[in-house]
Amino acid sequence: MSKFRNKDKGELPAISTASLPDIVFMLLFFFMVATVMRDSSLMIENSLPSADQVEKLKKDRTVFIYGGKPNAQYKQFGTEPRIQFNDAFIGVEDVRASVIQAISELNEDLQSKVVIGLKVDKDTNAGLVSDIKQELRKANALKVMYIANTKTEN
Amino acid sequence: MAKRAAPEVNAGSMADIAFLLLIFFLVTTTIEKDKGLLRSLPPIDDSQVEPPIIKQKNLFTVLINRNNQLLVEEEQMDIKDLRQAAIDFLDNGGSTNAAGESCTYCKGKGLSDSSDHPDKAIISMKHDRETSYEQYMDVQNELVAAYNILREREAARLYQKYYPNAEKVFTAMLEEKEKNQYSKDDVLNERIETVKKLFPMKLSEAEPDKN
């Protein structure tokens, strides 16, 4: 008789799930903190140059333009530096229209304060950058930030 | 088949572990914030007005060739000397500005073949289409640094008393402005403008030649 009673007790006790909410919250917080909102994946190599006289960029009023050589995944586009805007390669002549479009999508109070963030690979020719700048002048978006890594002052 | 009763796992410390991990990640993750050099482009000007004639001595020319070499005022220069050369040029104060005032705050040598007044001093840079972007940024950085150093100096002279503990007064002022961006502080804005006006950033870029 006692043998059978022992068998009853031998069932596995349920694992406590009391800490599950904690784990979930922890993950939630972690992702909330660490996630960088980015709506476009880079199709180009993008190692930024460095500078020490940098200022912070206000993200809410920024339109990004990327420039550089197509990366390994997109090598069918050749090795010449290209301009990427949002999710696509664009030609120099499309910069103006794309920028105007992007500015019109911004919050109205910020439209006059828009800053164009240029994230250009450091091995690019400066000629490409000056082409972009010419187009930006035509689009009347005159504030430009050359995004760079911070170099420690020596 | 006698099974032994497994002891219940004590879950009381789970929360502690979770919090420990949470704090660890909170401390170690850095949110990437973009930084860079802020510059303004000149608006397109279609008017046929003759550009004013600028005296050669008020112009500091920086050329970068396709091999990333620098030519500053007709002489080849190393990038590490550029900052000091730009400061010497801007701070020269050889003569008067358009209003006839001489530069009382300049600490330069007052050479007659360098700039008359910070108001008149213009740095002009031109690069080749094949200059690397890295070199271009390095040069921009050095030139902006020259202005920043001079502005820091003037800010320290004028406003150090309000920021006794600040090592860099102008930076401290800009940070304060950033912090209170939703409540306008006219006194602070005016001070910042005053410092900027002492050394106005006149940094022009010529379009590279097309060929």
Image: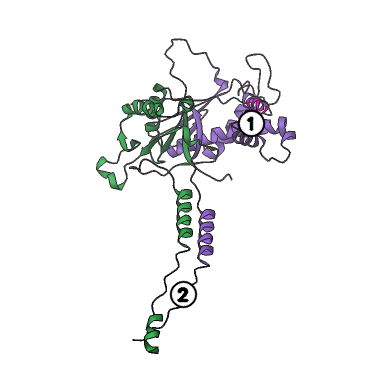
**Which quadrant, please, contains the C terminus of chain A?**
top right
The amino acid marked with disc number 2 is Glu
State the extent of the magenta-drawn residues as a range. B181-193
Whether residue B29 is situated above or below residue B11 in the rendered picture: above
Question: Residue B81 versus residue B179: which sits nearer the camera?
Answer: B179
Q: What residue is shown at x 45% (from left), y 26% (from top)?
A: A108
Does the image show residue A146? yes
- Magenta residues, dominant SS class: helix
Residue B26, image x, y percentages: 52, 54
Q: What residue is shown at x 43% (from left), y 25% (from top)?
A: A141
The span from disc 2 to disc 1 (Cα, nearest Å) is 69 Å
Residue farthest to the front?
A: A1
Question: Residue A131 versus residue B23: which sits nearer the camera?
Answer: B23
Residue A78, image x, y percentages: 27, 41
Whether residue B57 is situated above or below residue B136 in the rendered picture: above
**Which quadrant, please, contains the N terminus of chain A?**
bottom left
Mark linked to residue A93: none
Colour of chain B in the rendered structure image? purple
User: Residue under circle 2?
Assistant: B8
Mark linked to residue B151: 1
Q: Please, which chain is the residue tagged with disc 1 on?
A: B
Mark 2 or 1, nearer chain start = 2
Which element is circle 1 on?
A: helix
Which element is circle 2 on?
A: loop
Q: What residue is shown at x 42% (from left), y 38% (from top)?
A: A119
**Side (left or right) of B191 relative to A121:** right
Residue B65's image quarter?
top left
Residue A89, image x, y percentages: 30, 36
Colour of chain A in the rendered structure image? green
